[in-house]
Amino acid sequence: MRVFAFISVAFSILIKQAHGWLPQHQHKSDNGITSNSQPWLSRSSSSSRLLSSKADTPSLAPEVQEQEDEKEKHQHDLFDDFVDFLLTKQKEIIHELEDLEAEHTAKNDDTNEPAVFSRDTWGIFEGDDDDDNEYDEEDDEPLSKTKETLASATTNDDKPPVGGITRVIQGGQVIEKGACSFTLIGQGILSKERAATIRARQQGSSTTALPNNKDVISIQEGDHYAAAALSMVLHSRSPHVPTFRSDVRVFLVQSKHDSNHDTASSSAPTTMAWFGGGADLTPYYLMADDITFFHQCYADLCQSHQEAGDNNVEEYTYQSMKKACDDYFYLPARQEHRGTGGIFFDDMTMTSSRLEFVKGVVETWMPSWIPLVRLRQQMTVTEQERHWQLLRRGRYLEFNLLYDRGVRFGLANANPRVEGVMVSAPPLIAFEYNYPIVPDSREAELMKVLKTPKDWV
């Protein structure tokens, strides 16, 4: 299923998103997700549980209803678990990166204060002044204020259950500009156009077009959905340290229709959810050992879950996700790839074991990138190397504006949250007409790989 092809974090991340699902009451997220919020029909969770009314569905036999309710509850519990995980990881990542900035500021004997992340909240999180200075790694509840905000939102009919927390760092010694954004949509309603888009992608997927596939539900206009995402981009100051991009996302839909006949049936409603996400590098100079290390981190993660039987679907092997990443981050007009890739996946049906895999992806983000910073950050930078970095950043922005589905959809909608959508843009770029690349130079070495991706593992 290509469900996530339109649920995207604007700087992914990430995220292929669902825009324009209703013409009224739309809320634009940093991730390019548009929410058409409706009052929750059940507010039994402090996170973003989605429950729909049973009044417009046929009566079920008690034992069947009990089974359906249990399936639905399990999906909601996994969704809520993921939301809590993303909120926690956002905070942990911010502190790890701020510690990294402080470490390198001290190394350079800089008398200035190290750069820190700003905090911009919107929607249900607006006014959430959670003080990150009080963060404690040993604290079992590091998000108490944020969770209180969520709990309050679930009982407030006047406050739509949609919002986000945008964290941005600028002017750092390690990260010239970076962002780590969380977005939550508690409940939205699919428009006719978006429901048709999802169905078309289901029918066009080799893994979902099979008869009686349990991973397929008939998604129709009016079905409820919920979504959550964490996305990140880190534009390095040094051209010897690659830019890092990553995101994970979940999309949950509750259909009231039979998967074969598109009409209400005795098995309705049906709730399903899918994961998407990934991580990739955009280097400016090719440090082969660094790229191999990065890819090996995710290959090892995929292998560990395959060996455990958690992720043995062929579509989600390291090799297939590496290819999907290469295919997506491609500039067809230039006939070159944006970077050296990583992994990219979507439409991964949500199960308990796959939730653990996606959590593992997030847990791998910093261990796959920070060692490269520590290895390369102190290298001397020439003016020519800096100029080349800015030229390659121009390609990064070119991809975002011309080809990234999240950014394009985010900017195309009425009243977009432009700062959030464009937060992935590099801080400084350069465009130079017909820039000459010297044969056999380090720049030429990079371009060879960008033209023809190689296997790193």
Image (cartoon, rainbow, N blue to C red):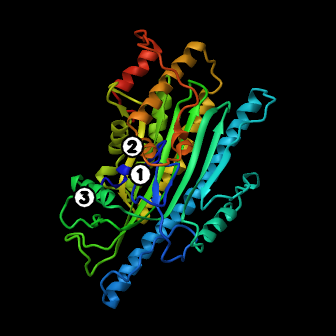
- Looking at the picture, does residue 101 appear above or below residue 125? above
Question: How far across and down, in percent of the image, does residue 24 sit?
Answer: 45, 60
- Residue plotted at (60% across, 55% down): 122
| Residue occupied by mark 3 | 208
| SS category of the residue bearing label 2 | helix
Looking at the image, the residue that sits furthest to the right is: 111
**Residue 287 visible within the image:** no
For marks 1 and 2, the one nearer the N-term is: 1
Give amino acid for label 3: Thr
Horizontal side of 232 relative to 143 (left or right) equals left
Question: Dots 1 and 2: beta carbons under 8 Å?
Answer: yes
- Residue plotted at (51% across, 18% down): 388
Binning the other alpha carbons within 10 Å of mark 1 as few (below 14), some (14 to 19) or many (20 upward) gives many
Pick the residue in front: 157 or 89: 157
Binning the other alpha carbons within 10 Å of mark 3 as few (below 14), some (14 to 19) or many (20 upward) gives some
Give amino acid for label 2: Arg
Give amino acid for label 1: Gln
| Residue occupied by mark 1 | 17
**Residue 100 visible within the image:** yes
For marks 2 and 3, the one nearer the N-term is: 3
Pick the residue in front: 152 or 437: 152
Looking at the image, the residue that sits furthest to the left is: 211
| Residue occupied by mark 2 | 405
- Looking at the picture, does residue 386 appear above or below residue 93? above
Quarter placement of the C terminus: top left
Quarter placement of the N terminus: bottom left
Q: Dividing the picture into quarters, in which one does residue 265 lie? A: bottom left
